[in-house]
Amino acid sequence: MQRLSGLCSARDTGAPRSGASRTGAGWLHQPTSHTILLPKRNTITNAVWVGETTARTASEPTFGQSEFTVKELATYVDLSLRMLEDSANVEAEVRLALAEDFGLKEATAFVNGGVGAASAIEPTGFMTAAGIAETNNGHATTLSPDALINLFYAMPATYRNRGSWVMNGTTLATVRKLKDGNGNYLWQPSYQAGQPETILGRPVVEALDMPNVVAAATPIIFGDFKAGYRIYDRVALDVMPDLLTQRITGLARFHARRRVGAGVVRTDVFRKLKMAA
């Protein structure tokens, strides 16, 4: 199964990071402040067919800006000095536990982050961003194979041919059983190592935090994540041991923090499946 964080080509790094899930960056950037400004094209040029001597007309495309603020994730862990002295590799285990926790919290934010008051402290998820189009499933609680096909072909061909499906495991289990009108399964397995399984020829990514198939939910999203979603790594997971300030109680404190910003930069390259008639 392809990993969620590998979808986004513009995973911009401000510090070195490790792990297979960190390899999705197609172009790298090192933000030097907590705010990133991206140019945003609001209109396109307008070329017209002309005769040999017809006067040409000017085009005036306009540009705006998208702003992303780097957010911070943090915690600390206290361990006894005796445990540090007597247990093998306990510090490595602490770092591993922190990395797992931060990874899960990050993945949740990339899907559903930034709702309401949380928008001030969390990255914005691609499921909570405003302005993404939806295709109705045609039934409130039962997934329709025709709806998936309709959603797929509602996307412009350029983005459809670069798109990926994202859903949770429960939804994926249902989709794997769906067939088209000719009795062919929409889902196809991968027969090559390192290649993802597909739906209608496009890769499938499992994300734990996607909604389930229930009335009014949007359990599936399809889109060109490399074009439409940005992740900015300002500071990698930083774990700093403090062996002094808690010593009076026989403890060592491990401070952990991470700074990352994320959000949708183009809504037109995504489409959700809405569980509605």
Image: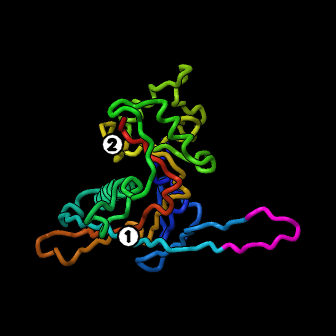
Q: Quadrant of the C terminus?
A: top left
Viewer can see residue 23? no
Q: Name which residue lies at 46% across and 63% down.
A: 231
Q: Say the numbered circle drawn on residue 2.
A: none
Q: Position of residue 140 (x, y in %)?
A: 33, 34
Amino acid of disc 2:
Ala
Q: Secondary structure at mark 2?
A: loop
- The correct choice, above or below, for 68 with respect to 218 in the image is below
- The correct choice, above or below, for 121 with respect to 190 in the image is below
Residue 8 is covered by the magenta coloring: no
Residue extending farthest to the right is: 52
Q: Which residue is mark 2?
A: 217
Residue extending farthest to the left is: 249
Which residues fall within the magenta stretch?
A: 48-59
- The correct choice, above or below, for 275 with respect to 19 in the image is above
Q: Closer to the observer: label 1 or label 2?
A: 2
Q: Name which residue lies at 68% across and 72% down.
A: 59
Q: Which residue is mark 1?
A: 259
